[in-house]
Amino acid sequence: MANLSSKTGTITTPVQTQISLSNNATTSVQDMSAYDSQEVTGFVYVDATADLRCSFKVTVVKNGAGTYEVASVDQAGDNYSGSPLLTFSMSSSTLRVTLPNVTGFASAYMRYQLSAPYLGGNYPLSVSASQVLGNAAGTAAAAGYIGEKITWASAPATAAIGTSVADWTNASLPLTAGTWLVVANITADAYTAATAGTYAVSTVSITDSSNTVVQNQEKSIGALTPANGNQRNLGVLSFSFVANLNGSTTYKIRAVRASTAGNAGNLYNEASYRSEFFAIRIA
């Protein structure tokens, strides 16, 4: 069963899906619990000794007692053994279809759509299926669609990390409402002077616009001089988390350094040491 509903601003476009049908068996088609009345239109193809094709329109209503029933069925195309090819029924709020025992049956499918998805309700596109076809064209997803990618508009430059926490200039992501996978790979270092016992710790975090660390996304890299001789640790700090947003939010990279005198740390984004910060809409 693949449950469909669609809402696209002020214009509603029916969304068609495909399900497989079994021979001499009943298959669940669509959950109607979101509707008081609905029409389902589509067609069925049966690969058999003699192939069969049939288009249909089914009207389902919820009666005064709160029970869902098939109010009408129109079929055009092939019959089987003198009877309509398809038999529609309800199981609670779920529309079902039954195929007869077709001679030489190999496979069958139904493609269908809701004729009038509810525009005023909160029903974004949803597909309950084991597989969803991806985009094979190699084009980027448009804004608002699953697969949309947001990255920093202007890449930040390599910058020193100070002893007071501060934003990394331009390292921010403005995200709209939705569910996002947020990823950052930040190249940073910590550098100590030659004096034994000196240390430096560079701490990088992802925060919201209020400078609050998001989902414990804070990591550090450090260096310690055990004996005379400079020490430098350079590495990539990796972050990832899922953000469920009900409004617009800006995430940003912030950093701070704790150290003894004369030590340093940097955030890098240059030819030899790249950093990245991006989000992909996943729902």
Image (cartoon, rainbow, N blue to C red):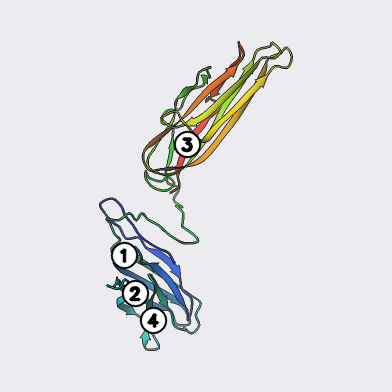
Residue 272 seen: no
Which of the marked residues, 1 or 2, is nearer the chain's N terminus?
Answer: 1
Which of the marked residues, 3 or 2, is nearer the chain's N terminus?
Answer: 2
> In the displayed structure, would residue 114 be above or below residue 233?
below
| Residue for point 56% across, 20% down | 257
Q: Which residue is mark 2?
A: 55
- Per the rendering, the mark at residue 278 is 3
Look at the numbered discs 1 and 2 and tell me whether their residues touch, using CB distance below 8 Å: no
Q: Which residue is mark 1?
A: 35
Which of the marked residues, 3 or 4, is nearer the chain's N terminus?
Answer: 4
> In the displayed structure, would residue 93 be above or below residue 237?
below
Q: Quadrant of residue 191?
A: top right
Q: Which residue is mark 4?
A: 85
Asked whether, in this view, residue 172 is left or right of residue 77, the answer is right
| Residue for point 37% across, 67% down | 112
- State the image coordinates of residue 205 (x, y, percent, origin top left): 52, 29
